[in-house]
Image (spheres, rainbow, N blue to C red):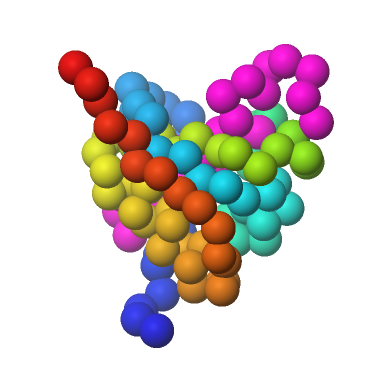
Amino acid sequence: MGRKVRIEKVSEEEVGYTSIQGCIGIGYQDIVEVFGEPNGGTEWFLKLDGVICTIYHYKSDENVNVRKVTKWHVGGFNEKAIRKVVKCFEKTGWKAWWLPFVSLS
């Protein structure tokens, strides 16, 4: 099954200037079970094996019940972020979709 991913929560300052790296299809409670409660509101600021990652709902400032959201954005400094997040969920037996972000510029 491979080694366990080292999960650390980090501050908002440490994740500054990250950008979208992909999307995952998963429920709020599933995220909480793997990463704990969000850092603030509906965002997780994480370091997974040293890779900075964020998980957030793009429209969370609107009147959305995030407990019903099943599409989440994953941010980071590069594509390693989405891959690390997916790896954490795969270790729980998660079987859902994920998409890497592809820049057209």
Snapshot quadrant of residue 30: bottom right
Q: As drawn, is 91 to the left or to the right of 16?
A: right
Residue 53 lies in the magenta-colored region = yes
| 23 or 32, nearer to the observer | 23
Q: Tell me the quadrant of the picture where the C terminus can be found.
A: top left
* Front residue of 52 and 68: 68
Residue 16 visible from this viewpoint: yes
Which residues fall within the magenta stretch? 42-65
* Residue 41 point in image, percent of width and height: 68, 30
Residue that appears at 35% across and 27% down: 19
Camera-side residue: 84 or 25? 25
Q: Position of residue 96 (x, y in %)?
A: 55, 58
Given the current orientation, which residue lies at the most extreme bottom position? 1
Residue 28, given in percent of the width and then of the height, sits at 70, 46
> Is residue 14 shown to the viewer in this render?
no
Report the side of 52 relative to 67 (left or right): left
In the image, residue 73 sits, relative to residue 34, either above or below, namely above
User: So how many labels did they put on this image?
Assistant: 0
Quarter of the image holding residue 17? top left
Q: Is residue 12 above or below residue 24?
A: above
Q: Residue at x 50, y 35 (%)?
A: 73
Q: Position of residue 101 (x, y in %)?
A: 34, 34
Q: Does the segment drawn in magenta span residue 20? A: no
Residue 99 in the image: above or below residue 11: below
Who's the residue at 56% across and 34% down the image? 56
